[in-house]
Amino acid sequence: MRLGVMGGTFDPIHHGHLVAASEVQSRFALDEVVFVPTGQPWQKADRYVSPAEDRYLMTVIATASNPRFTVSRVDIDRAGPTYTIDTLRDIRAERPDDELFFITGADALAEILSWKDAEQLWELAHFIGVTRPGHELSDKGLPEQRVTLQEVPAMAISSTDCRARVADGEPVWYLVPDGVVQYINKYRLYAGPHADPRDDT
Ligand code: ATP
Ligand code: MG
């Protein structure tokens, strides 16, 4: 099987994530794309992150209707901060025969490339960097064999903006799936005392 792996905080998951995953699934003929919400930062991060269980459930709701999309708990069930190397090792252990394609936005790709252990990442998966409005997708210094850049339909949506909108009482309809709008309202996410929605981290 050709397996896409889409990691993210998904706080909340939005249509930018879903379009990127769908486009890569089609272009690279992936059998499945597994969404992997990150674990809860155990140190006080620079912004409040919603509980892992809420982010996991919103990801399940958002992907439920697509037969090729699934969700994994590997990162939220592992203690400590999430590192992509651990995500890929855990997925590989569960699916030893699958070929892995890690899907990531231009901003996250730049970050991954700066890591010391990047060499080990290239051995575990092929990396697909997708375009994202406001972020350059440059191929400077990318190992050509292991990284492919892919244009996806431009969706100027970020979770940071979605959180800010909810906190300001503005709509997030059509930025996130309907079920996610309802989940946010039902559990009053992003509107409480923890909300620090303008912190773009
Ligand atoms: P935040 O604003 O809280 O950082 P985010 O919108 O960047 O949230 P993440 O969960 O951080 O969402 O992103 C997960 C992955 O999806 C990252 O690789 C990111 O680059 C990618 N991504 C996020 N939004 C888009 C988008 N609109 N188009 C393409 N890729 C995206
Ligand atoms: Mg981000």
Image (cartoon, grey):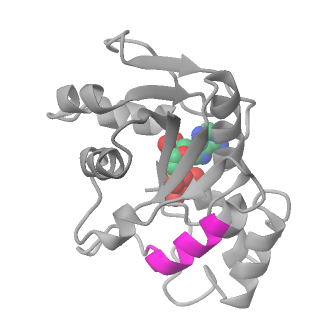
Residue nearer the viewer, 165 or 120: 120
Residue 54: within the magenta? yes
Residue extent of the magenta highlight: 49-60
- Location of the C terminus by quadrant is bottom left
Direction from residue 47 to residue 17 in the image, left or right: right
In this rendered view, identify the residue nearer to me: 74 or 114.
Answer: 74
Q: Is residue 10 magenta?
A: no
Q: Residue at x 59, y 56 (%)?
A: 70
In this view, the residue farthest toward the front is 97
Residue 163 visible to an observer of this rendering:
no
- Residue 135, compared with residue 40, is above or below; it is above
Q: Position of residue 192 (x, y in %)?
A: 58, 89
- Image point (33%, 41%), residue name: 96
Residue at point 38%, 69% (across, down): 76
Looking at the image, residue 80 lies above or below residue 107: below
For the stretch drawn in magenta, the main secondary structure is helix
111 lies above or below 143: below
Percent of width and height locating residue 80? 22, 69
Task: Answer with the quarter of the image where residue 154 lies.
Answer: top right
